[in-house]
Amino acid sequence: MKRTHPSAVVAAVVAGVVIGYLVDLAIVSAGGKAIVPPISLAITLVGIAAIVVALAWPIRRAVKERSTKHLDPFRAVRTAVLAKAAGLSGAVLLGLGMGVGLFLLTRSVVPPASTVWQAFATAIGGAVLLVGGLVAEHFCTLPPDDTDPEHEERAHA
């Protein structure tokens, strides 16, 4: 599995901004109230980021310390996939929070500051989840193999 490419992260953030802005625009244009994510969402995203990093920490220890303790490869792969999913989900939620905040700030009547703060708190929570996912993904990365020709043993006839 390859690590998350920066262009994928940027694309996910841009997609989140567009979705957040356009969904709120469509709802308000139809006569409804704008969707503002609750502050509990931001707190939950930070908690999920902490859990993802905590799950990746034993894998990092096993990889870096060259321990003799057996590392379950299925657990390592599942943790790496979870880290990648958390990183991309965090990028989308970062963009979503920014899109909703941008929508609220561009209205002719600016909503209360607490409403705008909730949208940007979601963006901050998404950023924390993004960083946590990328850090956990780094923890699950194996070091490169030693392919130096000097150190290779050669068979002699």
Image: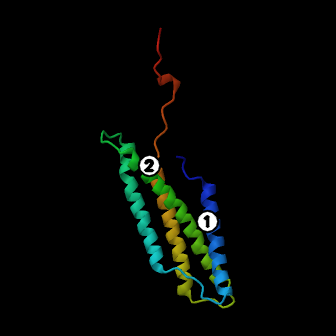
Q: Residue furthest top?
A: 157
Query: Where residue 131 sits: x, y (%)?
Result: 50, 61
Q: Name the amino acid, label 1.
A: Val
The answer to whether residue 19 is above or below residue 140 is below
| x then y, percent, for residue 138 | 48, 51
Please tell me in which quadrant of the rendered image residue 22 appears. bottom right
Residue type at the position of mark 2:
Val
Q: CA distance from mark 1 to mark 2?
A: 25 Å
The image quadrant that residue 34 belongs to is bottom right
Q: Tag 2, which secondary structure? A: helix
**Which quarter of the figure has residue 28?**
bottom right
- In the image, what residue occupies the spot 67% across and 81% down? 26
Q: Residues within 10 Å of mark 2 (few under 14, many from 20)?
A: some
Q: Is residue 121 above or below residue 67?
A: below
Report which residue position mark 2 lands on: 77
Residue highlighted by disc 1: 13
The residue lying at 44 percent from left, 74 percent from top is 43
From the viewer's perspective, tell me whether residue 98 is left or right of residue 153: right
Please tell me how crowded label 1 is: few (under 14), some (14-19), or many (20+) other residues with Cα within 10 Å: many
